[in-house]
Amino acid sequence: MGNQPSTPKPGTEFQVIGAGLSRTGTASFSEALRILLDGPVYHGGTQTTLGPPVEIKTMIQILANLFPGRTETSEKEALQLLKERFSGYAAATDAPASGLVPELLKIYPDAKVICTVRDPKAWEKSMEGVTNAATMGFLNVILLPIPGMRHFPDYINKLRAQWRTLYGEAGKEPMTVETYERHIEWLKKVVPEDRLVFFAVKDGWEPLCKALGKPVPKDIPFPRINDGEAIQRLAKRKLTQGLIRWLIIIATAGLALIPMIWV
């Protein structure tokens, strides 16, 4: 997860579908793509939590149109919304794009599909913290006063429907090594072999540049962004923001009641 949302740049060619699951180095990968493709990258986790409310609301609508079931009309609407949302971006990474690969290939048939990977057991352990932070029961109430983030619990529920549809029983929480492996199997089924690349961010520039046909950047170290720390910071900030807004609401309501008490 990046530190701030990206801004679309009109006229940018969409070139890469990031098919790696969350917590596989997607933030570092996104920054690397931004450098190599010289254009903004849509990192799902960052855009939906730090971007304007339209970001998360649109993603909720897209997911609702596709999962668990879809019609010809709802799929057509979802594809149009995806095209609008990703217009001006060079790539899309992280959830929900990682589970929308077939749909994105319909819109961008020439795009390269790159799946970031890591040790499955390490991924499983990393996902425990993310799942716990995203599914706390009191989020509905605390996030209610925050525009955009008040939709976060609904967004997580839509992501759950996506995961269950794609991975079956392995898509249910808690996420496990089986979930990770089912995602890899699914990608191999829906993406032509010559279009699918697996990439570990720990390997740095060379394999990524080779996949994209780009020269290795000179004097620019490969980005190393700690997604876990960023998620923890975001969670604390949003919870604090929600609590402060509730205190203001309660205090304001209390002040409004004082004249009535003395009447």
Image (tube, rainbow, N blue to C red):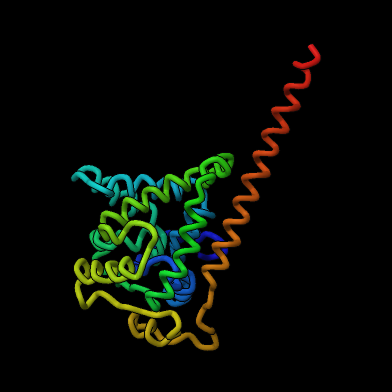
Residue drawn at (62%, 45%) of the image:
242
- Image height of 191 relative to 247, above or below: below
- Image height of 28 relative to 55, above or below: below
Q: Nearer the viewer, residue 196 or 159?
A: 159
Residue 107 visible (yes or no): no
Q: Quadrant of residue 111?
A: bottom left
Q: Is residue 230 left or right of residue 124?
A: right
Q: Nearer the viewer, residue 112 or 147?
A: 147
- Image height of 39 relative to 215, above or below: above
Location of the C terminus by quadrant is top right
Q: Is residue 132 left or right of residue 20?
A: right
Give the x, y percent position of residue 134. 49, 54
Q: Nearer the viewer, residue 242 or 182?
A: 182
Looking at this view, name the residue that lies furthest to the top: 263
Residue 200 visible (yes or no): yes
Residue drawn at (29%, 55%) of the image:
164
Give the x, y percent position of residue 51. 52, 53
Q: Is residue 221 left or right of residue 74?
A: right
Give the x, y percent position of residue 233. 60, 61
Give the x, y percent position of residue 256. 73, 24
Residue drawn at (50%, 61%) of the image:
6
Residue drawn at (33%, 49%) of the image:
63
